[in-house]
Image (spheres, helix red, strand yellow):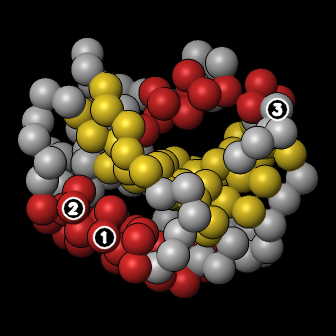
Amino acid sequence: MTNWNYQLTHFVTSAPDIRHLPADTGIEVAFAGRSNAGKSSALNTLTNQKNLARTSKTPGRTQLINLFEVAEGKRLVDLPGYGYAQVPEEMKIKWQRALGEYLEKRLCLKGLVVLMDIRHPLKDLDQQMIEWAVESDIQGAGTAHQSR
C-alpha cells in the first residue's frame, strides 16, 4: 500500500454482494473484523477523513460491502462485521454469505486487515479469518488493535 495518497480516497459504491461490485480488476485491501471492531473508524483514520466511512457505536451498522477508491484501480473495502450484532438471524446469514463470497472469489483482493477490539480476546472467528488469509496467500494480511 505504499505510494497511495489516502487523503484523495473517495466513496465508490455499496453492494450487497460481489455481483453488484465494480469489475474484479486492480488492487483491493479489505478491512475485516467482528461487528463494532472499528473497521470504518480505521478507514477514516487512515484517510484522514472523519466522515468517509459511516461509523456507529451500534454493532452491525455496516451491512453492505463498501468500496472506496484511493487512486485508479486501488481500492479500500469496508466489509460487514462478523459475530455479534443485534439484527435478525436471516440478516446475519446474508452478511456471512456475502463476506465469504467476497473473500473467496474476489481476485483483486490483495490485502486484508483484520481488526480486533483490544478489550476482547481473540475469538474463533478472528482466528479463522487470519488463518484463511495466510492459507490464501493474501499479502499484507495483519491485525490491528483498538481501544475506545
Q: Secondary structure at mark 2?
A: helix
For the residue marked with disc 2, what is the amino acid? Gln
Relative vertical location of residue 111 with respect to residue 2 in this rendering, above or below? below
Q: Residue 127 shows which numbered tag?
A: 2
Relative vertical location of residue 90 with respect to residue 84 in this rendering, above or below? below
**Quarter occupied by the C terminus:** top left
Q: Which residue is mark 3?
A: 5
Tell me, yes or no, whether the two marked residues, 1 and 3, touch with CB atoms within 8 Å.
Answer: no
**Would residue 55 appear left or right of 91 to someone viewing this image?**
right
In percent of the image, x 83 and y 39: which residue is there? 3
Identify the mark nearer the N-term, 2 or 3: 3
Q: CA distance from mark 1 to mark 2?
A: 6 Å
Task: Work out whether residue 17 or residue 133 is closer to the camera in this orientation and state it.
Answer: 133
Q: CA distance from mark 2 to mark 3?
A: 31 Å
Tell me, yes or no, whether the two marked residues, 1 and 2, touch with CB atoms within 8 Å.
Answer: yes
Q: Residue 16: percent from the left, percent from the top?
A: 50, 65
Q: Residues within 10 Å of mark 1 (few under 14, many from 20)?
A: few
Q: Secondary structure at mark 1?
A: helix
Q: CA distance from mark 1 to mark 3?
A: 30 Å
Q: Residues within 10 Å of mark 2 (few under 14, many from 20)?
A: few
Tell me, yes or no, whether the two marked residues, 2 and 3, touch with CB atoms within 8 Å.
Answer: no
Identify the image quadrant of residue 15. bottom right
Question: Quick check: can you spot residue 31?
Answer: yes
Q: Residue 142: percent from the left, percent from the top?
A: 43, 51
Q: Residue 131 shows which numbered tag?
A: 1
